[in-house]
Amino acid sequence: MSGVTVTTGRAVRQPPGALLTLAAAVVMTAAGGSLSLAAGTALDWALVGNVGHSLLLGGAGWWLSRSRGGRPVGWLLLGTGTAGALGVLAEGSAAAGFHAGVPGWQVAAWLALWLWPLYVVPLFTVLPSIFPDGRAPSGNWRWASWLGAGASVLTAVAAAVEPGPLPAGEDAGPPNPLAIAAGGTLMTTAGLVVVAAVLSSLASLGVRWHRAGSAQRQQMKFLWYAMVLVLAIELLGGLMPYHVAQAGYFLIPFLLVGAIALSVRRYRLYDIDLVIRRTVVFAVLTAVVSAIYLGIVSVLGMAVGPSPGLALIASAAVAGFAEPVRRRLQRAVSRLLFGQREEPLEALAGLRQQLRAVADPSEMPATTANAVARALRAEYVSVQLLADGEYGEVARVGVSGVEPSVDVPLEWRGELVGTLTVGPRAPGEAYSRSDLALLNELAYAIGSALHAVRLAEDLRTAQEQAVHAIADERRRLRQDLHDGLGPLLSGIGLAVDGVRRTLSTDSPVAGELRVIADQARSAATEVRRIIDALPSAAVADLGLTAAIADHLERCAELPGAPLITYHADVDEARVPPAVADAAYFVLLEAVANVLRHADAVACTVTLSTGGGRLVVQVDDDGAGIGERYVAGVGTASMRRRVSELGGRFELRPRDTEGTTVRAGFPMEGGG
């Protein structure tokens, strides 16, 4: 399968050939450098670069070859480093032989002509095509690495037969004895092939990136970053001062080899983000400083004319401006890449401020999840509340992926109240110690908030249970009064009247019995009054849907009443008494508002159930509530009745005209 991530594990037995090759490269590099210096060659960028690059490539190749995963790339680097060492030895031998008049120095000089492509060209044409596991991304892309190898050999052949002088240290030697007339054309052709090989190699790297998993993409981030820097050096080198440009060229192999070595051995992969951040800061700061410098020089030059002090003034202004700009850039880039991990106090203050602004405790989990996502720039955050020994998700930001997440326990005074789960910023990216420290601090504050949420949830549950218990008790009391005490008192009165009629009218007992009968009838009347005064008597007598229909029929007969349409689809057996009473109250209040204030032509009342909820909705086509509407006592009472049962109340203008009142009640609380 293509796109396999390399894991190096422990080092394997070192092949003796790799160590011997490295030792030979070191000896040849040291000998060649010493011969060049002895021949009077200056210690310039060319000599330092050739020596340094040869040792770098050889050492990195030997180091990578110690692991199975890095062996293919390691041997390639070791080979290029050895070719570079041969080139250094050939140049040193040619320079020393030319000045000492040693016969045969021309052979060493001719070798120096064409050895350099063998350790320069493969870095750009072969390595990207086999990075990081030493194989092509698929069988269809093997030709890219072979094209790179062919381009390297073709360039070496062209250099061997290209017309020109032989190298002899800092002096020009005699013409190349093996030069041919077509050597220049061959070198041009080789250059075109090298360009094609580089583009093919980069395309191969792009294909690998597309097919790679998250871990291998993280590996490849190093090389992409190094390639961008190399490209910038190559493009801008001609515009830089000589020594700055040469320093950049000197760093190119270090950038490429360092990126490849870190990626193949998977050593501190995620530190690349810190490098990118500092590079962005440096680049932007350099551009800003240069612009300010040139702007000051230009403005002062136009104002006072050419003056030697302009550069000094501009430099002083830049020096005073650069550090504040750097700090601001550092902060902005850090926030862009990593959130507020370097500003933990600000992150905590922001979380506290947001929690303080929350009016409903049920909104706290969502607020905390959003705060954590912003503070860490996390793609996924989940808050789970522990209740009755089970975890339940109460807030989420983003979508959970296959990448491993960080789970942080949420505690309040040592008591576990929930768990905070945070996904990575990007696939394969782990959080640093600073990130985890910030996450722990946020978790402490979130634990206190979740404790408040749990208390509010417990209070709401107790309130719901109390409301349901009161409604049930009212129903039971009404039924007992209606079916028990009321008929009993009426029966007592009738029985006493019956006994009284058996007596003579002038009997003193008959008068006393009449008083007793009147008192029994008065007590029965008072019982009926109490029954009628209990809330939602109509619901208890008729049922919810019939009680609503009866009320709407009486409303429709009022003068100026709108056309009222009623739709009901409810299984009343599943509606708890408290929910039925509250729904009836909300509907009465909403319809009363339509009659008093809406000036509506039509009003639609809908009663339905679905998803474990009873929904009451009243729509009218009246004047609407307006932009500056202030809720009155009736609206506040409706909202309170709904919230007591854990429901949701909405009062909003309709899309066309008029107002919608909607109340949703959970039905599972009634049992």
Image (spheres, helix red, strand yellow):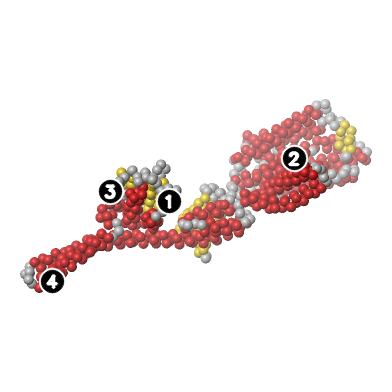
Of residue 26 and residue 497, the one placed in the foreground of this image is: 497
Q: Is residue 82 visible?
A: no
Using the image, determine if residue 357 lies above or below residue 186.
below
Measured in 3D between alpha carbons, the distance from the residue under mark 2 to the one under mark 3, in whole angstroms, is 87 Å
Using the image, determine if residue 521 lies above or below residue 320.
below
Amino acid carrying label 3: it is Leu
Name the quarter where the C terminus is drawn: bottom left
State the mark number for residue 558. 3
**SS for callout 2:** helix
Of residue 263 and residue 322, the one placed in the foreground of this image is: 322
Q: Residue furthest right?
A: 101
Measured in 3D between alpha carbons, the distance from the residue under mark 2 to the one under mark 1, in whole angstroms, is 64 Å
Q: Residue at x 71, y 45 (%)?
A: 287
Q: Residue at x 74, y 41 (%)?
A: 233
**SS for callout 3:** loop
Measured in 3D between alpha carbons, the distance from the residue under mark 4 to the one under mark 1, in whole angstroms, is 64 Å
The residue where tag 1 is placed is: 629
- Pair 4/1: label in front: 1
Dots 2 and 3: beta carbons under 8 Å?
Answer: no
State the image coordinates of residue 652 (x, y, percent, origin top left).
Answer: 41, 48
- Pair 2/1: label in front: 1
The residue where tag 4 is placed is: 512
**For marks 4 and 3 on the same chain, the one whose residue lies earlier in the sequence:** 4
Dots 3 and 1: beta carbons under 8 Å?
Answer: no
Q: How many marks?
A: 4
Measured in 3D between alpha carbons, the distance from the residue under mark 3 to the one under mark 1, in whole angstroms, is 26 Å
- Pair 4/3: label in front: 3
Q: Is residue 264 left or right of residue 541?
A: right
Amino acid carrying label 4: it is Glu
Question: Mark 3 Cα within 10 Å, few/some/many (few <14, many 20+)?
Answer: few
**SS for callout 1:** loop
Q: Is residue 122 left or right of residue 576?
A: right
